[in-house]
Image: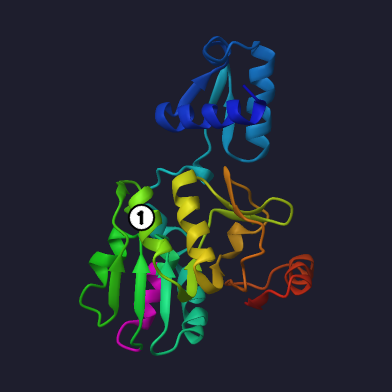
Amino acid sequence: MLGLERRQKIMELLRRERKVYVAELAKLFHVTEETIRRDLEKLENQDLLRRSYGGAVLSESTSEDLSYTRRSAINSESKLCIADKAVELIHDGDTIMMDSSTTCQALLQQLKGQRSITVITNSIRLMNDFMNSGFQMICTGGKMRESSCALTGSTAYQTLHNYFVDYAFISCKGIDMDKGVMESNESESKIKEIMMEQARKTVLLVDHSKFNKTAFVKCDDFSHIHCVVTDEEPSREWQDFFLERHIRLID
């Protein structure tokens, strides 16, 4: 088993058990304890876990199991600021795809009663909150992840492939100049990848805390991103990074 595959398996186990032990992992993967310690060190450097005596625990900053309610409360003012700015990108008649992020929920709330649009989403929460909003809401179907109220799996993927839209609005766990747009969960990362492929333009909604932050899975290398909307002016380095890639920045 390659090191990358082993580290992916370690993260899967850690998400289930919340804590892992070096000795047990060494036996499970038939490698030395020193090899496991190096794996844990690499994962800690990515802010995916925190090493403890004899093992490791999941890093809360990248945990995929934060409830929708808890995620809604994190940087809520920043999300409203981003939503206010992103509203101007959407016009009557637009077709859009939205992921299950709480930032997209804030954006739709700002649009309520103002735009006649079609929204395709994998979010149970968005479908429930905006069923009587006047928007035409289309749900992907699929297997629900309880922690995020998101639908994933083959049914959701196939539904998204059936549509081509004006915009995809997505958020993420973090963005890094070298590693790209990052997510903590493979199935939801796949949803975002398909949304980007099926949209004429993709708008990335990220607050200031997401810059220079990595997570478990790479969604994109910025090649599908046309616009980034954030709540604060990023560093000059990030401004130049977006400019070089012809990515519009709204801050």
Q: Amino acid at mark 1?
A: Ala
Magenta segment boundaries in residue numbering: 105-114
Quadrant where the image shows the N terminus: top right
Decide if residue 148 is in sight here. Answer: no
From the viewer's perspective, tell me whether residue 115 is left or right of residue 47.
left
Q: Identify whether 38 is placed above or below 194.
A: above
Picture quadrant of residue 112: bottom left
Residue 217, x across and y down, in percent? 57, 45
Few, some or many residues within 10 Å of mark 1 (<14, 14–19, 20+): many
| Residue 117 within the magenta-colored segment of the rendering | no
Decide if residue 227 is in sight here. Answer: yes
Q: Could you tell me which residue is drawn at 27 percent across and 66 percent down?
A: 127
Q: Could you tell me which residue is drawn at 42 percent across and 61 percent down?
A: 101
Q: Could you tell me which residue is drawn at 61 percent across and 40 percent down?
A: 47
| Residue position for label 1 | 156
From the viewer's perspective, tell me whether residue 164 is left or right of residue 69.
right
Prevailing SS of the magenta stretch: helix
